[in-house]
């Protein structure tokens, strides 16, 4: 029985196939597909590789590529769900399998992607935590002498990898901007630098009250140095920071279980509370689109919907009042304006 405690009966339904195609197994094709995914960020590549090893190949490795059916894929998804895998894991495993089948379609080895249209478990959304200004201040104070990291995360919305990769030359204290051009992620215990999540540089506004402490943080240091580092001067790692600083600070103020990523949610919440529109929040956070920002933070913009309704209500009231004032008054269709020439 494969890893995860589930097994799928596959094959036997594919009828007559080209013997050459029948010899190409899912395992063969998966290796070829994965080797060519050069566009993936290191962290994504690591995740895809893990999904292949743990969820895809234990079931499909020896199955002929041409023997995979839509029903088999559906059964595989059902078995993973029954085995207790998280819906998000099931969905990601299905995505990886679907991607390698899609390549087989483009390569002419399959006529269609049989993984398309398979019903997937719904991935429930975890409830987001938004801190108040007061809570951010308390958390930062409890994290001293590393409190500046808390404040920058909570008031700029930087991802952890973006903060850890921020270099001094990309801090403009005059214009109060941080240029996000790099991100760092941990892959197999090694810090790997690359582009931000959307591969796009962006300029993030810096509140005035953070200018002076950041100036002190970078004073006298070279432009290519990292703004924030570990106590030993190395790349700041999320797990180490949480274990040594963040978790203890959060628990001390009654916020046990809080994660650094929730400071990014906090930045969005505080910005919207001060009137930032969806496009401004999108640019600050580096989302690929405003639609994504709305999808992630729809609840924060409910007040905007109320304002729209209020404005429509006022506009309708003005229109009704204008109608009453002009009731019975209409244009004189026989009148000819002096500056118009009468024809006919």
Image (tube, helix red, strand yellow):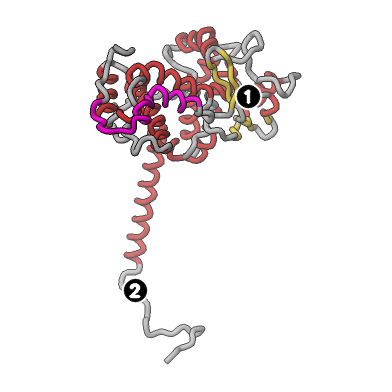
**Quadrant of the drawing holding the N terminus:** top left
Q: Is residue 160 left or right of residue 311?
A: right
- In this figure, what is the number of numbered marks? 2
**Quadrant of the drawing holding the C terminus:** bottom left
Q: Is residue 227 left or right of residue 55?
A: right
* Disc nearer the start of the sequence (2/1): 1
Q: Residues within 10 Å of mark 1 (few under 14, many from 20)?
A: many
- Magenta highlight range: 12-35
What residue sits 50% from the left and 38% below the top? 276
What residue sits 41% from the left and 32% below the top? 296
Residue 130 pos. (x, y %): 43, 24
Q: Nearer the viewer, mark 2 or mark 1?
A: 1
- Of 194 and 146, the residue lying toward us: 194
Q: Residues within 10 Å of mark 2 (few under 14, many from 20)?
A: few
Quarter assignment of residue 172? top right
> Which element type, helix, strand or loop, lies under badge 1?
loop
> Which element type, helix, strand or loop, lies under badge 2?
loop
**Mark 2 to mark 1: distance in Å?**
67 Å
- Of 258 and 69, the residue lying toward us: 69
Residue 329 badge: 2
Q: Is residue 286 left or right of residue 220?
A: left
Give the labeled residue for mark 1: 166
What residue sits 26% from the left and 20% below the top? 8
Quarter assignment of residue 220? top right
């Amino acid at each position: 029985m494969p890893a995860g405690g589930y097994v799928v009966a596959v094959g036997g339904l594919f009828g007559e196939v080209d013997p050459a195609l029948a010899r190409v197994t899912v395992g063969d094709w998966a290796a070829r597909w994965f080797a060519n995914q050069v566009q993936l960020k290191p962290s994504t590549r690591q995740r895809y590789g893990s999904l292949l090893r743990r969820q895809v190949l234990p079931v499909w490795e020896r199955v002929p590529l041409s023997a995979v059916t839509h029903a088999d894929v559906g059964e595989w998804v059902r078995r993973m769900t029954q085995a207790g895998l998280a819906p998000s894991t099931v969905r990601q495993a299905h995505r990886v399998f679907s991607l390698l089948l899609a390549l087989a379609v483009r390569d002419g080895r399959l006529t269609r992607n049989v993984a398309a249209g398979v019903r997937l478990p719904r991935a429930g959304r975890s409830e987001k935590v938004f801190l108040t200004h007061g809570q951010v201040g308390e958390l930062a104070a409890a994290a001293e002498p590393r409190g500046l990291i808390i404040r920058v995360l909570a008031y700029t919305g930087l991802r952890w990898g973006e903060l850890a990769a921020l270099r001094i030359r990309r801090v403009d204290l005059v214009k109060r901007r941080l240029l996000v051009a790099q991100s760092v992620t941990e892959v197999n215990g090694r810090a790997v630098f690359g582009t931000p999540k959307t591969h796009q540089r962006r300029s993030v506004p810096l509140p005035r009250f953070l200018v002076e402490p950041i100036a002190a943080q970078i004073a006298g240091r070279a432009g290519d140095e990292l703004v924030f580092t570990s106590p030993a001067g190395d790349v700041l790692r999320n797990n180490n920071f949480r274990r040594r600083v963040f978790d203890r600070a959060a628990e001390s103020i009654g916020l046990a279980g809080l994660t650094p990523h929730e400071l990014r949610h906090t930045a969005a919440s505080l910005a919207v509370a001060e009137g930032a529109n969806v496009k401004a929040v999108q640019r600050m956070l580096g989302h690929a689109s405003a639609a994504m920002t709305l999808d992630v933070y729809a609840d924060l913009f409910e007040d905007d919907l109320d304002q729209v309704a209020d404005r429509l209500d006022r506009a309708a009231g003005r229109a009704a009042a204008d109608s009453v004032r002009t009731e019975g008054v209409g244009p004189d269709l026989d009148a000819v304006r002096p500056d118009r020439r009468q024809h006919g």
